[in-house]
Image: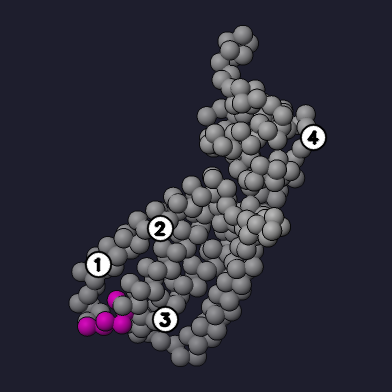
Amino acid sequence: MKNKAKKVNSNEYDERQLFERNNAFKFGFIVAIGMLLVGQILNLIFGEGLGSNLGFWVNFWCGTTFWVSISTVIIFMILKDAYDGINSRPGMIIFSMWGITAFLLIIANSIVFLIEKPTFQALLEDGITFSNMVMYACWLSMCGVYWIKYLVDKKKNRE
Amino acid sequence: MSKNIALKVARAQKDMTQYELAQKVGASRQTINAIEQGEYNPTIKLCRAICKALDKTLDEIFGEEDENEEQG
């Protein structure tokens, strides 16, 4: 019974980590609101230029806002050593997978761009491509921040 | 916040690494490091756990250092 309880607790966060995670979610929420405001301002400025392209704005708000906010929360947690638990490092696998996937998808998309050669206007109007690019950038940045932080901490510990 | 030298010294006396102390008190190594560096102010619950793990009193580890500073 005791062993079982210990296993359940193995992924727990300590008090400082919980505090920092709480701050990260607050920060992410503010970023999400900020993104909505940015979207609204862009809509006011370029709305006419994009015409009645609902796809772009739906994707901007749903895709871009979502991933930028989520990556802000996660990067905040990584920088404050609050993503991984006391005895676990789930980030190592998750961010490596995201990083590799984003890298491969960027290569695949670049090949498609080179073949199809779409115009800038067409890319802008295609909300899915735009929000996908933002999503890949978010995955890559999370992966990058995680591994840089990990290597810097490792070097510091050695010293 | 100033660095918690007393904690570092007490840990060294016990020949414990930050990781070992962290495991003993149920915190992460980074949290112990943050306490030693004076970047984090722990709750009384964690303070007591640390003191228990190092066989020290709260005053010895987390007491005011003003007296020592004045003497020095």
Which mark is first along the chain, 2 or 3? 2
Label 4 to label 2: alpha-carbon separation? 41 Å
Give the residue type at disc 1: Gln
- Please tell me which residue lies in front, A58 or A141: A58
- The label nearer to you, 4 versus 3, is 4
Q: Which residue is mark 3?
A: A129
The spot of residue A131 in percent (x, y) is 40, 75
Chain under disc 4: B
Task: Read off the residue under disc 4.
Answer: B15
Quadrant for residue B40, please give it.
Answer: top right
Residue beneath label 2, please?
Answer: A28
Residue B55 lies, in percent from the top left, at: 72, 29
Whether label 3 touches label 2, CB < 8 Å: no
Q: Residue at x 61, y 8 (%)?
A: B71
- A51 or B9, which is in the foreground? B9
* Amino acid at the residue labelled 3: Thr
Magenta stretch: includes residue A54? yes
Q: Is residue A156 visible?
A: no
Circle 3 sits in a helix, a strand or a loop, which is it?
helix
Q: Which chain does the residue under circle 3 lie in?
A: A
Query: Disc 1 sits on a residue from what chain?
Result: A
Label 4 and label 1 in one chain: no
What secondary structure is marked by label 1?
helix
Please report the bounds of the magenta region as a residue range: A52-57
